[in-house]
Image: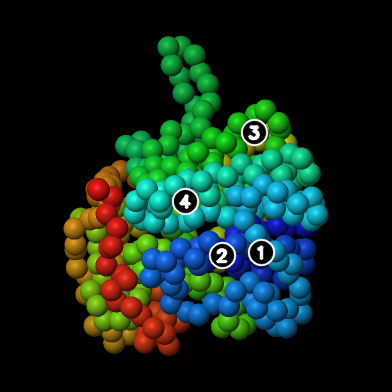
Amino acid sequence: MRIMVLGGDGYLGWPTAMAFRRAGHQVRAIDNYLRRTLAAATDSDALMPNPRLPERVEIFRRVCDSPIEFAEGDCSDFGFISEQVQDFAPDAIVHYAEQPSAPYSMIGYDEARTTLSNNLLATFNAVWAVLQHAPDCHIIKLGTMGEYGTPNIDIEEGWIDIEHKGRRDRFLFPRQAGSLYHTTKVLDTDLLWFYVRVYGLRVTDLMQGPVYGISTDEADLDRRLMPNFHYDDIFGTVVNRFLVQAVASVPLTVYGKGGQIRGYLNLRDTLQCIELAAANPARKGELRVLNQFTETFSVNELAERVRRVAVGMGLPAEVRHIDNPRKEMEEHYYNPAHHGLLELGLRPHFMTDDVVAAMIEAILPYRDRIAVDRILPRVRWRQ
């Protein structure tokens, strides 16, 4: 297939581009380095040095003897993305081209506006570029399990059947996002559903949980091909943060009570899920929603797992609870369905102690680059 990866320089976008190209597909990666720019502006640079796309593509070509096309440009510029879709004629577009940080979106007005305008325009423009130039193209959009929030009922896979006053209908599962970033993802879903209904687009919306991991088949061939690994409070995930805190011998900081439960998955499983979605496209006129995670953990469970493995490796790790900078439920019910991708053939990689140890081993050579003052929360939800 011809696969276009929007946000091809990102933590997920770059490994996705490599995996599709190595599997024999034609790939064009697109990025404007917004995430790098915002990370630099907030003193949140990645732990490992990562080349920019032109150098990454050249390293990959030499290592794997396979070229990846790339284009630098802004997906919130309709002229640019329209031209790219017309020229490349993709069979599938994998859409990662969004500001990916909940904390960043909650810093203040300027950051909120950047998140809102970038994320919604990137989705809106991708839709219209497909409508005008590639109407049969399958849009694979990265959503987030954070769209659902933490309702006191089971979370279905995207849709819910409702009976009300003797009548029945099927609706998108109610969303209740906990940050402006997550709210833009809710609005993405609504935009996509509108254009699917009206124009018959084919869309898969992947409700992904937090991703962890550094290793992929391609990245393991050359350290310079590794994905961007953020560990700070703004662009880093809780797993990355705990791993780096363990390596730096500082306490693993749990926000609040630590009972917050989410669904997690290994980076390798993200690549599997995207590949399965592309190989099994949504039907014309279908918005297919798949909940993309493999295991659920509370923050306390994650912290204890990392602490236990780190101590076993001779690192003096301990856990410390701090005030929660976010506005969220710290103890709640959480039971989301996630059968769709398993039925398509997903074979999960679980977070075993060996997996945690391997991530710590990968971080250890970069211990001297860790800036501890980036880890504690610098952003609070309440103004």
Q: From this viewpoint, is residue 376 visible?
A: yes
Quadrant, the N terminus: bottom right
> Which quadrant of the structure image shows residue 288?
top right
- Distance CA(mark 3)–CA(mark 1): 27 Å
Q: Secondary structure at mark 4?
A: helix
Q: Residue at x 39, y 83 (%)?
A: 369
Q: Nearer the viewer, residue 45 or 25?
A: 45
Name the amino acid type tagged 4.
Thr
Q: Residue at x 69, y 51 (%)?
A: 81
Q: Nearer the viewer, residue 268 or 4?
A: 4
Q: Secondary structure at mark 1?
A: strand
Residue topped by disc 1: 72
Residue topped by disc 4: 114
- Distance CA(mark 4)–CA(mark 1): 19 Å
Residue topped by disc 2: 33
Q: What x and y, as percent, mark residue 246?
A: 30, 77
Sequence-first tag of 4 and 1: 1
Residue topped by disc 3: 195
